[in-house]
Amino acid sequence: MGRRAAALMLAALLAACASPPTRQPGEAAWTAGRMSVRIDATSTSGSQSVSAAFELRGDGKSGELRLNSPLGSRVASARWGPGLAVLDDGKGQRRFASLDELSREALGESLPLVALPDWLAGKPWGGAAHESTPSGFNQLGWQVSLAQRAEGLIEARRQSPPAVLVRVRLDEPGS
């Protein structure tokens, strides 16, 4: 039930657009854009497809991810630090031991949120080995394509069942 509610909430954000909040002196920069996630069906669950406007800052060790409605209002946010990830969906906060656990609970599948800030910056995450490819790199079982990053498009694909596709369009291409 919780996964389905999170998926429905995120699905309502289709075609959303948001601009990052004003940065205070000493604060890390925000990365903003739109993100879609498609999880293929398995023998035990149907396919899922969600999309949201997002704002992200930080790295794999600590940071914050905000999901916004088409009008820019906050729908959900996650923040993390060593040994703790917190999801606030507007109905309350839930605590998790890791970002991996948080994404698994919210979407039913583990997504590499710890690596996402580096991937959006156009580089492999420093916490795991990677292999360079002509269009980007492979890391953590994901194929990350940076072929259209100059236009603000990044794609990460996991082939192992269930297959997952994450597409990102950055508000500021090449940033």
Image (cartoon, helix red, strand yellow):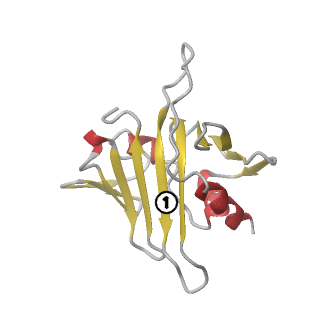
Q: 10 Å neighbourhood of mark 1: few (<14), some, or many (≥20)?
A: many
Write down the residue under mark 1. 37
Is residue 81 in view?
no
Question: Looking at the picture, does residue 162 appear above or below residue 2?
Answer: below
Q: Amino acid at mark 1?
A: Val
Looking at the rendering, in which quadrant would you find the N terminus?
bottom right
- Give the residue furthest to the left: 134
Residue drawn 37% across and 33% down? 172
The x, y position of residue 127, in whole percent, is 44, 47
The x, y position of residue 162, in whole percent, is 48, 75
Q: Secondary structure at mark 1?
A: strand
The x, y position of residue 143, in whole percent, is 33, 60
Q: In this rendering, would 73 be left or right of 61?
A: right
Question: Looking at the picture, does residue 62 appear above or below residue 40?
Answer: above
Q: In this rendering, would 163 be left or right of 130?
A: right
Q: As rendered, which of 80 and 70 lies closer to the eye? A: 70
Q: In this rendering, would 139 be left or right of 70?
A: left
Looking at the rendering, in which quadrant would you find the C terminus?
top left
Q: Using the rendered view, name the quadrant where residue 141 is placed.
A: bottom left
Is residue 117 in view?
yes
Q: Using the rendered view, name the quadrant where residue 171 is placed.
A: top left
Residue drawn 68% across and 65% down? 3
- Give the residue furthest to the right: 92
Question: Looking at the picture, does residue 152 appear above or below residue 142?
Answer: above
Q: As rendered, which of 34 and 118 lies closer to the eye? A: 34
Residue drawn 60% across and 51% down? 99
Question: Looking at the picture, does residue 112 appear above or below residue 172?
Answer: below
The x, y position of residue 46, in whole percent, is 58, 78
Residue drawn 61% across and 38% down? 71
Q: As rendered, which of 67 and 112 lies closer to the eye? A: 67
